[in-house]
Image: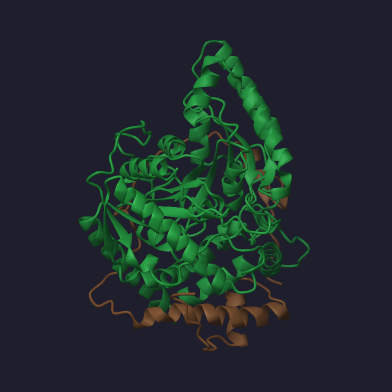
Chain colours: A brown, B green
Amino acid sequence: MFWYTKSNMAKLTRDDVLKLAGLAKLELSEDEVNKFTLEISEILGYVEQLQAVDVEGLEPTYQLTGLSNVMRPDEIVDYKIERSELMKNLPAEEDGQIKVKRVLA
Amino acid sequence: MSQWPSIKDLASDVNSGRVSASEQVEKALKTIEEKKEFNAIIATLADRARQRAKTIDDRIKAGENVGRLAGVPFIAKDNFLTFGAETTAASNILKGFEAPYQATAIERLEAEGAICVAKANLDAFAHGSSTENSDFFTTLNPHDKSKVPGGSSGGSTASVVLDMAPFALGTDTGGSIRLPASFCGAVGYKPTYGLVSRSGVVAMASSTDVIGPLTRTVADSALVLDIMAGTDELDSTSIVKDKLGYELSPTEAHLKGQKIGMISEYMSEGLEPEVKDSINMAIEALKQAGAEIVDVSLPSLPLALAVYYVICPAEVSSNLSRYDGQRYGFSQQDTTNLDDIYKQTRSIGFGNEAKRRIMIGTYVLSSGFYDAYYKKAQIVRTKLVKEFEDAFKKVDFLIGPTAPTTAFGVGENTADPLKMYLTDIMTVAVNLVGVPAISVPCPVSDNMPIGLQLIAAQHQDRKLLEIAQLAESILK
């Protein structure tokens, strides 16, 4: 396949993957750790080609159509959504409030 | 032959009372049931659709004009928030989620009398190019059940090609409307970034996500776009629509005098010979019809996929951080503290591709690597923006294939995520620079469809649809 150079560089270690999973609030099985270590290394190897690109004098593009700071009037709008409609998807509630687990173990 | 007339004719037939909205809904639901084995549909909205049809028929009997989409059934990709069925984004983590409001796009279509009849399958959270990443099942290509329909709007596209409804809605973050359109033989339209409000659509990569139609004809896409397009106070990135609108009349534009740039990077080696031949034939036909075809080079195009696979996972990791098991969706309640509920909910609820993208995104955004990956990618993106701007100073449109191959086999690419990502190689640049593009079916000798991609400058959606309609009539 064109534009496709596989990198053999082992970019990430097992520990890197475990650390990333922790930051992203994911728990991985042993199989997943092994699989992701390889796959993510390979993908990072592929995007590595960006490092060599000369970008002298260019700024990043974060917004495409030139909009910035789009404002609206600071007014209360009634979207006609019932509180019960918003609450019906809650996994746990008590007295009409969202119930969360304790923060400290 | 489709069982549906053009969308315009269908709405006019319903408004005039010649046919009823209820008949249209039944036709759609019957076809959905008959073509079940293709796995295009996650759920139908049968009850709500029948009710809406009845209301519309009553209003028409009372002498009302119900709108430009009166009684027209449609199918929404399951990442659109709708009433009447769950909205899951084909993910386990959103299973059971009942949307408390509808997407702006859905509201606008309904306001013109359209009726959503079903929710279509996709790669979970729209992460993928084949629908094989759906947490539920894989959609099969309508032309060959051993092949994928493309993705991520594979269910929507297949549903249109299987004649379940006159149109379907998709989302296109890196090619997810155009790619399945190419693989299944439909028209797929990706508008200028911001032209259709993203409010009420499950976010993937917010700086490139757009909403668009999948249809049988360019005219149908243009009409649906016209109704969805324009600013929405619920999406601050939305932009104003063209004052002429997008609905087309049959003979507005001419190919004569149009300068079309053939993208040399997309026509280089690596293109499947069959695709190359088909695209060359299509381009020759446009030339015969009076278009001026020139070669155009956008030298940074080979970098687009690498840019995309930094920016997209970065935005994905940020957008998916909201799935915390606290407010909606799947929640692993059998835990003792808050951190555990986050971790277990996300580990069970997210599929492989979501996890992979979350972790890549977390990596490229982390403090030590942000400049080297994320910022660098955003700067290379500027290079692409400039090259497209320069190209559109020289030509009116760009042209090339939508995908380097025809539809691949189910299971063929699942073991190699990077190879799967490469499916999007000819579509992602368009998303990174925010320009509109369309995939139109090409004539094919074999049975698997091939899409011709036409691209215009930002805000030139109307001109693009006009030229695409001409191309469509020539290629038929």
**Residue B72 shown left or right of residue B443 in the figure:** right
Q: Is residue B312 above or below residue B464?
A: below
At 41% from the left and 38% from the top, the residue drawn is B222
- For residue B365, above or below residue B171: below
| Front position in the image: B445 or B385 | B445
Q: Measuring from the top left, give residue B388's x and y in whole percent.
A: 29, 61
> Measured from the top left, where is residue A18 in percent x and y?
63, 81
Q: Is residue B324 left or right of residue B402?
A: right
Position of residue B340 in the picture relative to residue B11 (left or right): right
**Taking the image as drawn, is residue B455 in sight?**
no
Q: Residue at x 21, y 56 (%)?
A: B393
Front residue (pair B183, B429): B183
Residue B342 figure quarter: bottom right
Q: How many dots with numbers?
A: 0
Nearest the camera: A87 or B103? B103
Image check: B373 left or right of A38?
Answer: left
Q: Quadrant of the C terminus of chain A?
A: bottom right
The residue most toward the top is: B62
Give the vertical position of B191 relative to B243 (above or below). below
Residue B226's x, y, as percent?
40, 36
**Residue ranking furthest to the right:** B334
**Who's the residue at 71% across and 34% down the image?**
B30
Q: Position of residue A28 (x, y in %)?
A: 69, 76
Vertical relation: A4 (above or below) B29: below
Taking the image as drawn, is residue B168 in sight? Answer: yes
